[in-house]
Amino acid sequence: MLQSTTFLTIQSTAAIISLIATALVISVVVFLMTTSSVDEDKTSAKNKVYKIRGRYMIGLISCVVISLLFTLRLLPYPQFHDKPDRTITVVAMQWAWKMTDGEPNVKPDMLEGTPDISVPVNKQIQFVVTSQDVNHNFAIYDAKGVLLAQTQAMPEYKNRLNYTFAEKGDYHVFCLEYCGLLHAGMFATIHVE
Amino acid sequence: MIQLSFEEQKGQRKFVVAWSITFLVLFPVLIALGLLMRLNQGEIIAMQPTTFYAIMTLHGLGMAGVLFSMSFAGLWYLIGTRYTKLSLGMGYFVFALTLAGVIGLTVATLIGNYAPGWYLLYPLPFVGTSWEEWSNGMAIISLIILGVAWIIGSSHIVSALAKEYDGAFNLLGWQYLGKKEVKREVPPIAMITTISLIAGVMSFLIGAVFLLLLLLKYFEPSLSFDPLLLKNYVFFFGHTLVNITLYCCLGWVYELLPEFTGREWKTNKVLVYSWNCTFFFILFAYFHHLYMDFAQPMIFNYFGQIASFSSSVPASAITMFGIIAQFYHSKTKWGIIPTAFLLGVAGWAIGGFAAVVDSAIAVNKILHNTMWVPAHFHTYMLCGVVLFILGFLFYITHSKAEQERNKPAKIGLWLFITGSAGFLSMFYMGGLNSIPRRYADYASSPIASTHDTGALLAYIAAIFIVLILVGLLTMYASIIFRLGADKRETL
């Protein structure tokens, strides 16, 4: 069944503003099609539209600037002052995950880890994510199937993702970057205790 | 306007018909591949992952290639019959190379099971693959052939226009920005073509570098490259290709719409600023594909979001308002061509808005690589580019009066729109429900709701795809039999 999304999650916010924009666009189309039979001098009609365009442009530029200022503060990237309570190394491979405590100084293909790991609730966890073969994507889902956080797992690079689990329970790791034949069967579990 | 002999016009007409037939044949076949994918995800049919991903790769490569090729062909025809002479020999050479590339990719995917996706992320094509080794080489060479074809074709159009209008700077409209009187007006289609195809050639060149590196790796497996650098290359190429496909189509909307609204649409200072800004936004917006690569220097992510958000200003305030000004109280008769163009702009606006939403890093961290991504690009491709192409195909096959009274085609168009709306809604709902994209099926999901939702939405989407095909084929019935006949108004 379709899961319900909590009001004003990122997903529901995206849905609401996209629906409003879609409704606006459809309204303009309907308006243009239903009123086009009116005959108006082209200069007068254009002047009316361009008058609205001037206001629209000021409004749009304001919206762009405000939304940039607002959203560019909500980045998922770790900050220098972040001090994670625990570090977990994650290695992706075709088509499984290896996770282990700490940040062992070994090559990704030599790392020994498991597809299940336990972490404490309400503690900041830093996932150090890499890959031993191709590009993958480390995505954390809650038990209801809601995507909570993600970062790419890339060979030769380490991506650091900080996340604090606010509730106990089992969380699932999906691969969100197409990585070959069994991409749709590449999962791991994070037990939050 | 240039003067062409009857034979020259006829030659250009045959040339665009050749591209149109290729489009008309391949497009529904590629939709059928998409239908198979959604049927598999919806658990109506059972397909091996090897087959699913080969089909997914062919669907993506095919759609990107076919839609760009047709948008390029439409521009070629309008420019080659109105603004500058274009060499048909060169045109057919580009056409032959394109066909060779398409055949190579079809063989690689359907026989060799080549399946790294249409934007392939190095080192995937070489590691842990399920496809034949030879298919890698064949696909890389086929893509290089396509790239060469498009570079040759784009360069020919731009250089021919530049000769006609005394240099590329004039084509970019820069003479409109000074105080001097403009000696020779540049039609919007010429400016848009130049801007789009220059960006296109830049992306094809980067794509060529990427493919040549892959070819080196194919012949010398011990070589290795930086995966993040190559990811930048491939997204720069892919993002730009998809963008210019739409912009090439907008070129002919600027050109043809005034014939139906009765209002001229000329280049002016605002239009020049708008499209020159768009050129830079096209080049920098691609960074939004790499937000989740945390190792990428953060400044690039800022560039990506700022360029993506800013691109909404020229797109909506200039082009979309320009189209509103064309239609508003214009006494336009709603034949299939102006209707397709207006709805195409609406589809572009809706898909573009969803793309801008996802281009916010704060949103992308939740929507990246969920179904929201195919949702927005399918919106502006299916309800934007494809509607523009259909409008163009009706333009070259129907007189103004014929396209006004063609009721079956209008019914086909609205069936197509209804099917598309339903089909796209399933993608959007998938994205909002965190359903991953590019999954052959959801059977292995450890979360029941992901499996149930993903499969249900795919099942419903498949029904709407059938409606899209019915609408499309209804319109085809009007187009196909008129392709051979000369249309009086355009000859």
Image (cartoon, coloured by chain):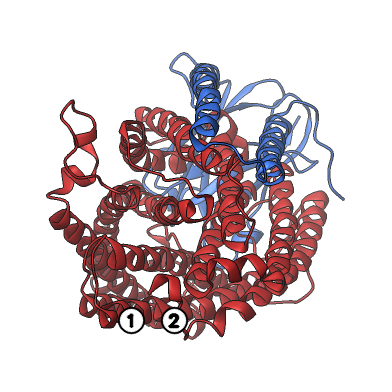
Chain colours: A blue, B red
Does residue A86 appear in the picture of this structure?
Answer: yes
Residues packed near mark 1 inside 10 Å, few (<14), some (14 to 19) or many (20 plus): some
The mark total stands at: 2
Does residue A135 appear in the picture of this structure?
Answer: no
Above or below — where is B312 with respect to B27?
above
Q: Position of residue A183 (x, y in %)?
A: 59, 60
Mark number, residue B10: 1
Q: Position of residue B316 (x, y in %)?
A: 51, 35
Q: Amino acid at mark 2?
A: Asp
- Pick the front one: B381 or A90: B381
Chain-order first, disc 1 or disc 2? 1
Are discs 1 and 2 less than 8 Å apart at CB? yes
Mark number, residue B486: 2
Question: Which chain letter goes with mark 2?
Answer: B
Indicate left or right for B280 with B331 as reference: left
Please give the name of the residue rendered at 63% of the width and 48% of the height, measured from the top-left corner.
B370
- Pick the front one: B268 or B55: B268
Q: Position of residue B274 (x, y in %)?
A: 37, 34
Indicate the quadrant containing the C terminus of chain B: top left, top right, bottom left or bottom right. Answer: bottom left
Question: Which chain letter goes with mark 1?
Answer: B
Q: Amino acid at mark 1?
A: Lys
- Pick the front one: B44 or B96: B96
Above or below — where is A25 with respect to B394?
above
Mark number, residue B353: none
Q: Could you tell me which secondary element the residue under label 1 belongs to?
A: helix
Indicate the quadrant containing the N terminus of chain B: top left, top right, bottom left or bottom right. Answer: bottom left
Q: Position of residue B13 (x, y in %)?
A: 37, 78
Above or below — where is B103 with respect to A76?
below
